[in-house]
Structures are given as C-alpha cells and as structure tokens.
Amino acid sequence: MASLADFYQDFRMNLSVRADTNSKATAEEFMHYFTDQLIDAAEIEGFEYCYCTKPEEAKINGYDFTEDGVLYLFIADFEDLEQLNNINNDEAVKIIRRAKRFFSKCLENDFYTGFEETSPEYVLGRLIRERRADISKVSLYLLSERNLSVRTKRAIRVSDIQNISVDVHIWDISRFCRMMASNGEREPLKISFSDLTGYNLPCLPVASLGDNCQYYLAVLPGEVLAGLYDKFGSKLLENNVRCFLQARGKVNKGIIETIKISPQMFFAYNNGISATAASVEVKRTGDNFLLLESVNDLQIVNGGQTTASLLYAKRKYNADLSKVSVQMKLSIVPSQISETVVPNISRYANTQNRIVDADFDANHPFQIKYERLSRQVAAPPIAGNLHGTYWFYERARGQYADEQTKMTPAAKRRFQTDHPKSQLISKTDLGKYENVWFGCPVSVNKGAQKNFAEFAKRIEKEWKINQDIFNESFFKKSIARAILFRKTEAMINKQPWYGGYRANIVAYTLAVLAEKLKRQGQTDSIFQAVWKIQAIPEDVKKNIIEIAEAVNTSIMASAGVSNISEWCKKDACWDRIKNELTSLICS
C-alpha cells in the first residue's frame, strides 16, 4: 500500500486533472472531489457548493438539506499545499466554529441578505432562516487536505444551537485515503447497547442452520431504535435496497398514527425490522438468559420506514416512545460471505415492491457488457495524436486504480496514456449523462443515487425487451453524450452571466437540446460528429450557450422560489422551462 505522502501527491494530481476537465477552480474542485467520494460511499446523500467567507467570522463551502430535516454544512481546510502537512485538534475546532457561526448568524438575523440574491450562499442563508422549524439536526463536516495529528486526535463536540443538536465529522486526508483504499466501503458501526441504554438487550438465539451464519431475535425499545437513527442516520440503512432507491427518510402515516394513538400496540401492528451484522458480543446470565452486549456493523435491511418514522414522530409530535417496542430479526453474516449473502437478505426482505437486479450490484449483464465495450472500443485520435484512447468504465468502484496496482512504472504510464483519468466514467456518471438525453433532467437534479435508480429501472426494462440494442453503436453514442455533458459544464463556467447552479443549468440545457434535436431528426448525426472529433462542433456549442443562458434566466426568475436547487428537482420546473423555451426548441 502506498504511503500517505504518496497518496497525497496522487490526490493533488487527480484534483488538478479534475479541475482542468471540469473547468473549476482547484478549491471548488477539492470540495466536489471529496464529496463525490463521500456520496458514493453513502456517507452523505448530496452536496451543493457555495462559498461564504468573512475572516475570523463565518465560513461555509457547501450544504445539503435532506428530506428528514438534517442540514449538512461543509467547510474546507484547503490551501493547495505542495507537501502533506498536519492539522491539530485546536486548529480543527477553530475552523468548525466558523461553520457553526455561519449557521447561528443565519438563525438570528438576516445575515444572508448581504449576499447576491441569486447566489447559493444567499439561498442557504434564507433556507436556514425560513425553514428553521424543519431543521432537526445539523451535521458539520470539515474536509481537510491535511492529516489530523494522531497525538492530539480526540472527539470534537460542539454545543447545540437554539435546541438544534449539532454533530461534527472530520474527514482529513488520512481518513480519505483509507476510504479510497477500501474502494469506498463504509466504516462499520460498532454499537454498544449498554452504552445506549444502561443495560444489555435480552435476545433469543435461533438454532444454527448450517450456513455459517448466526441468528437472533430481540425486541428493541422504540426510544433505542429512534436514538440509533438520530445518531447514525442513513449509515444504518446502507445495505437496504430501499435506501438505495431513496426511500430513506420517508415516513409512514399509519406508523405515525399508531405511535401517537396506540403506542402499546405497535409491537402487534408492525412487522418490525430485519438487520444484519458482522459479529456480536453476547453473554449469559446466571439464569441462563442470553444478553446482547454489542453489535459490529449493524445494518437495517428491512424496516427503514419504521425506523425513520419513530424518529420523525418524536421530533415532529414529541411522541412518547416509552411504550413502543419493535421486534428485530438479526442475522450475523461472516465477512467472507457478506458480499453475496447480505444483498440477498436485503433483496428477499424487501419483496413488497419489485426491485431490479441493477439496483443491487455491478454484476447485471448490462454493466458487464458496457464495461467490455469500454475496453474494446477505442475513441478516434484527437488532433495532434497518432493513436486513439479509451473511455474507462468503472462498473465496480476502484477498478481504474486496481488495474494499475501490479503494473511496472512503464506499464502504468502506457495505461494512463491509453486510458486518461479525464476519460474515467462511473456508474452514476453514466446514469447522469444518459438520463438528460431521455427527458429526465428532474431525476438528474435529484442527485446521483436517486438518478441512478431511475436509470437502472429503464435499462432493466429495455434489456429485457432487446438486449442487442446495447452494442458498439450505443456505446459510441453514450460517450458522445458524456462529452456533450462535460464540455457543456466547462463552457457554462466561462459565461459572463453565470453565477452558480451549474449542475442544474447543464441538466436542463442538454434536455432542451435533446428535445430540439429529436424534433429536427438530427440526434444521431450530432452524436456521430461528437464521437468522431471527441469534442462539440462549433455550431452546436453556440446553440448550447444560447439555450443555457435562457435556462439560467428561467430558473433564476422562478417566482416565490427560495431554494433554486430544490425548485430544479420538481416536474413543474421542467414544464416551465419547456414552455418558456418553446421557440428555441422548435427553431
């Protein structure tokens, strides 16, 4: 494994490539690079870049506001240092306090009015001020290019703000390195029931079924389950299929009514939860009862709505959960078989609605075929080059790095020449590029995971009808769509009217262009032209810029909208853009 110093230099190189490819300032790209990996690893759900800094007063570099009322605030520790450096706890605390100060000021006064009205900073400040009652918790994330000193490393806690709980997460470069080395696998949760409740949890063992797993039945107090979700959030649900389909955070009205009216009947009315873990610690009492002391890597694979609804009822209605009991079926799955067994537990525990195979792993035949095409089909050489290059598709996270691990330095250089890092495409990238061209910009604006779920559903349906359509021609067109998307991002950054919300503008711009080309019968010819030159023809560039400016005007002028990024996630936004841009679409 490479040293942390070597990883840091690779990190800086990748950051520079991404900044050039995406036409962003290095500091902004740092935030996107970091948060893209955190989203893929299910540490966070989304990210909206913004920039507010007032020396020694308040600072923020991004945010996300989830459906269950958690406000994520991100702050950067980044100066583009040439060599790896350390950050100590005192420095980290000082930076975190600036993010906390930003939140406090937005709560207390009209601090946000000092920003440009169309800027993300203004939108965030106004969102905090106007939706204060909807904010259930604030999670502060410090993302640092430096290494948190081991000698001073300790938990950082901050006080609540106006009765809103606040927790802190520090992601320094060493923690980022560990995540990348594990290909984005999440950090397991170690949960001690005695620490949570003051006592261990009674349970019943189920006789071994000869499958190398262990099974237990237990009853969780409602307060405990709600407390777990309050503390760990969606990390508890990462193996839940419905979590991937973005059902997390949603609440069930029937469950809420039971909690409010008949909490003592909750155990009888509710199906309970199914959970998995890597290991448990149990002990027997003198009366030969079994007690569950702690659980390593607890994951709720069925019962996400039950879990979220308990916390929602407590926060929203101050519900008394002391009479609520929830049955839990706990499967202990050894790590060596977890990759195959846990997805199946998740799959079969979630049979109420049909879940497509593409939602579970990278082994769907479409994924395998698309990966094979990406290794076989070389793109035409661009001007000045004698040889073509390949667009490298990662159907499984970390493949690009894994391919190079056993190569000699010379072989690695050849590989990177043939497969430039700028031509790396992930599964969620592909879903984004494809969905804008199939009339789904709203889905793209909802974030990588929600959008990929919609993409997976469509691909599964089309694969069953005729898998032969996913051929070399499809691959070339999909790469053309990727080029159009990425080059459009770069062009928009350079426009004099551009002031933010690039992701939203790009999605709607290309969706409008797709509508226009389809009506003109020019879609395939444009894709062929883009593939041939690996760039956008000049006349199409002019068309894109014209559409993008009109899209920008439309979303910025949306009457009564306090959160533009949220507005862009609604069907009404797409309908309005199509109506306002009819002349451009039909011209």
Image (cartoon, rainbow, N blue to C red):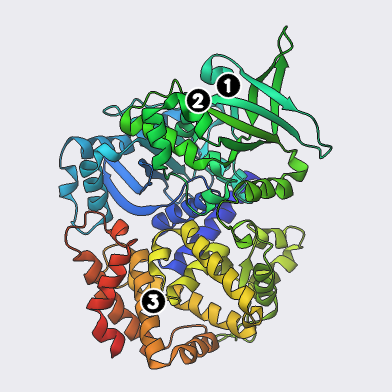
Taking 375 as reference, is 444 left or right? Answer: left
Label annotation for residue 193:
1
Q: Residue furthest top?
A: 286
158 or 395: nearer the viewer: 395
Q: What residue type is labelled 1?
A: Phe
Marked residue nearer the N-terminal end (2 or 3): 2
For the residues labelled 1 and 3, say whether their Cβ atoms are less than 8 Å apart. Answer: no
Taking 373 as reference, is 211 left or right? Answer: right
Local secondary structure at mark 2: helix
Marked residue nearer the N-terminal end (1 or 2): 1
Q: Distance between the residues labelled 1 and 2?
A: 9 Å
515 or 146: nearer the viewer: 515
On screen, residue 449 above or below 150: below
Q: How crowded is mark 3: few (under 14 residues within 10 Å), some or many (20 or more)?
A: many
Examine the rendering and report whether any part of residue 573 can be seen.
Answer: yes
Q: Which of labels 1 and 2 is toward the front?
A: 2
Label annotation for residue 510:
3
For the residues labelled 2 and 3, say whether their Cβ atoms are less than 8 Å apart. Answer: no
Q: Name the residue under label 2.
A: 224
Q: Position of residue 397 (x, y in %)?
A: 63, 57
Q: Residues within 10 Å of mark 2 (few under 14, many from 20)?
A: many
Q: Which amino acid does label 2 sit on?
A: Val
On screen, residue 447 above or below 97: below
Q: Distance between the residues labelled 2 and 3?
A: 47 Å
For the residues labelled 1 and 2, say whether their Cβ atoms are less than 8 Å apart. Answer: yes
